[in-house]
Image (spheres, helix red, strand yellow):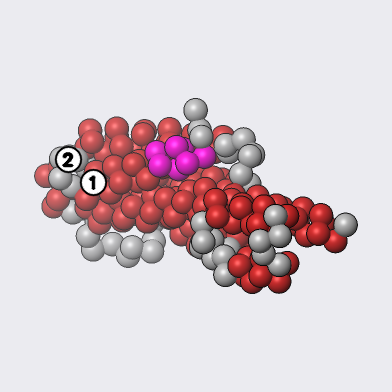
Amino acid sequence: MRRILFVVALLTLVTACASLPAKQNATISLQASEVALESAHDAERLLCSPTADPSAAITHCDGSGAAALGLTDAKHQQLARLFSTAFGAEIAAANALTIWRAGDPPPSTVAEYQRDLDDILAAVKLTFPSTQVAVTKTQTAVDEAAKIAVILGVK
Amino acid sequence: MTIAMLALLPQLLSAGLATEQEVANLIKSFQPGMTDAELNAVLQLVISGATKHKALADADAGKPA
């Protein structure tokens, strides 16, 4: 009897451990996506106003780079709304991943985060050349989010 | 030790090829990487960073805090 209980406990441990690699890989990709998205956001704000306090609101684009690229106040506000939505979805995805276990259905917030990132990528590509950090980092955020979707089996 | 090797341990035990103590020692040596608590700590960092940037984006967009 003791041996049977031990084997059952062992199998339970094996199952619990098996769920970790998926969560670990998804967490690592979400963190990489987050870092890239933060960099893209910082780069866009820096282009808008290089002299502004980075920890305060930027409501007016006064940088020479912004003028050269056509980054108007209206475009900056539009991008800010998209970034806000994506960061909100990322928070929801991270919260969902915190309680996610192998065998659970994929969190719907991951697909939502992917859609929001696609929206930002389309918008920054319309505004900036492909070599700009805001574009390359957003692309990285998109790529890492795609990895999460594969790991968790998002359709 | 991999997950697949770990899954074989009950068979070793039932076939009498290893004692419970030997199997227990093998389990202790199993390091699957980060623990669930460690992963959740990383996710909290993600949430913290995203929250800070969301607040900045909201401010830029003219949304009330």
Mark 2–mark 1 CB contact (< 8 Å): yes
Tags 2 and 1 both on a single chain = yes
Q: Nearer the viewer, residue B11 or A129?
A: B11
Residue plotted at (51% across, 56% down):
B2
Residue lying furthest front: B16
Q: Quadrant of the N terminus of chain A?
A: bottom right
Residue A107: x %, y % from top left? 58, 38
Classify B39 as above or below A155.
Answer: below
Residue lying furthest right: A1
Disc 1, SS? helix
Residue A123: x %, y % from top left? 29, 34
Q: Closer to the N terminus: mark 2 or mark 1?
A: 2
Residue A22: x %, y % from top left? 52, 48
Q: Quadrant of residue A131?
A: top left
The boundaries of the magenta stretch are A146-152
The kind of residue on which mark 1 rests is Thr
Name the chain under label 2: A
Whether residue A69 sits left or right of residue A13 in the image: it is left
Q: Quadrant of residue A67?
A: top left
Q: Nearer the viewer, residue A4 or A21?
A: A4
Q: Quadrant of residue A103?
A: top right
Name the chain under label 1: A
Disc 2, SS? loop
The residue wearing badge 1 is A136
Name the mark on residue A130: 2
Residue plotted at (70% across, 55% down):
B15
Q: Is residue B6 magenta?
A: no
Q: How many marks?
A: 2
The kind of residue on which mark 2 rests is Ser
Residue plotted at (29% across, 32% down):
A122
Residue plotted at (35% across, 41% down):
A142
